[in-house]
Amino acid sequence: MPKILVTGGCGYIGSHTIVDLINNGFEVVSADNLCNSDERVLDGIEAITGRRVQNYAVDLCDLAATRQIFTEHPGMAGIIHFAALKMVGESVQQPLRYFHNNLNSLLNVLACMQEFGVPNLIFSSSCSVYGNAAELPVTEDTPWQEAESPYGRSKQMGEQIIRDALPATPGLQSMLLRYFNPAGAHESALIGEAPTNAASNLVPVITETAIGLRPEMTVFGADYPTRDGSCVRDYIHVMDLADAHTKALQYVLEGRNAAPCEVFNLGIGEGVTVLEAIRAFEKVSGVALPYRLGSARPGDVVAVYADKTRAAQLLGWTPSRDIEDIMRSAWAWEQRRKKGSSTFVRDNHISG
Ligand code: NAD
Ligand code: WQD
């Protein structure tokens, strides 16, 4: 059973990916300092898979603590490096904190992979590396524009650090996965998006509004040059994303990759407007969402969605869930949290 270290394993995408990895025969160890998550997610993972995952609550910016994990788990087959700070707006306010956290954690993971001979790195990158892309859909070869935020730049720099490290590290290979807009929850509603910091992404804002945690939500911009005036994004179900990680890992473990570093866009390949997302939510939930049309959010791009051809052809990955599946699962998760389930009680703070 190949053993995988999942950094950020208590976080949103990490926890869903752990479920998929376990269901596909991998043994998993997590490293997450819980700066935006809660270890109770491990109860949810256990309830779904029957496996208790060990989490090291260490800051990966601490090299000695990171080394200790590698010492205790010799012979790991690979690492999926999710751990990062991810809030675009916060990164504008606290750029040095973002660069410190996102780059030092990556450098330490790479140093330990070199030292302990761990060969495969799957890296969480983001569509934010494209900046305000000049062409749609975005392919992996679409030229990068200036990043819109320190967060986006930390992902650009992370990718470049990995590319530079590979030739100097024989045997090391890396898949750079660029996610578009991850959303939704595991079908069981036992795990879902549960940041300890206030959520700002569209889907949690919708469900938090619908359940009454926010009085109303604002659609940021209603006169963009799109089919209904609101922004277009590519919402990808988190379990489809989890499946892509498992497939990317199998791809490198089986030696099917053509180069030591390959890049994949992970999106559904279709644009959905904010108003269409709201309508999809209202349809599957039966709840009329209190929202108002507001002004554009600074820094938002008008439209971005992925060309997913490469992931389909090389990884054999085809997302199977759409925006309604996203909303259905996110709503089930939100309702379950409201009940204060024994596996995960809401205690984050809401702003806005
Ligand atoms: P998340 O905040 O839910 O998960 C990240 C986890 O990493 C958290 O549990 C946090 O506690 C942990 N972490 C952060 N810094 C750490 C450190 N120094 N040491 C140990 N643990 C640390 O975020 P997520 O949505 O699951 O995102 C996972 C990855 O995917 C991130 O790298 C993020 O940048 C990337 N990504 C996310 C999105 C998105 O919209 N969710 C989109 C594109 C890319
Ligand atoms: C989606 C759409 C908003 C909240 C960010 C990062 C990106 C990636 C995914 C990490 C936009 C609109 C939102 C609200 C709204 N993350 N919206 N009212 O900004 O597309 O992407 O998360 O890598 O890099 O930039 O995601 O969910 O914040 O917004 O109208 O209350 O919803 O304007 O059009 P975004 P989002």
Image (spheres, helix red, strand yellow):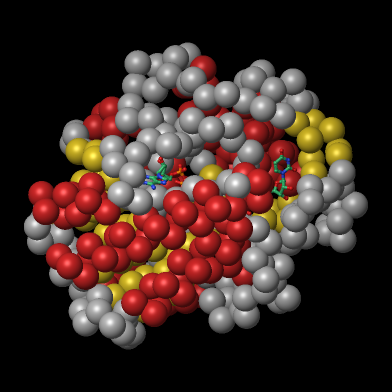
Q: Tell me which residue sits at (74%, 51%) in the image.
A: 273
**Quadrant assignment, res 122:** bottom left
As drawn, 155 above or below 101: below
Q: Is residue 321 left or right of residue 294?
A: left
Q: In the rendered image, which quarter contains the N terminus?
A: bottom left
| Percent x, y of residue 93 | 65, 46
Q: Is residue 78 left or right of residue 73?
A: right
| Percent x, y of residue 24 | 22, 53
As drawn, 237 above or below 33: below
Q: In the rendered image, which quarter contains the C terminus?
A: top right
| Residue 124 in view in this figure | no
Q: How many marks?
A: 0
Spot the residue most to the right: 223
Q: Tell me which residue sits at (25%, 75%) in the image.
A: 172
**Quadrant assignment, res 57:** top left
| Percent x, y of residue 14 | 37, 47
**Quadrant assignment, res 49:** top left
As drawn, 123 above or below 344: below
As drawn, 274 above or below 153: above
| Residue 309 in view in this figure | yes
Q: Is residue 335 left or right of residue 110?
A: right
Q: Tell me which residue sits at (28%, 82%) in the image.
A: 168
| Percent x, y of residue 115 | 17, 67
Q: In front here: 296 or 306?
A: 296
Q: Tell me which residue sits at (9%, 57%) in the image.
A: 74
Q: Is residue 307 left or right of residue 294?
A: left
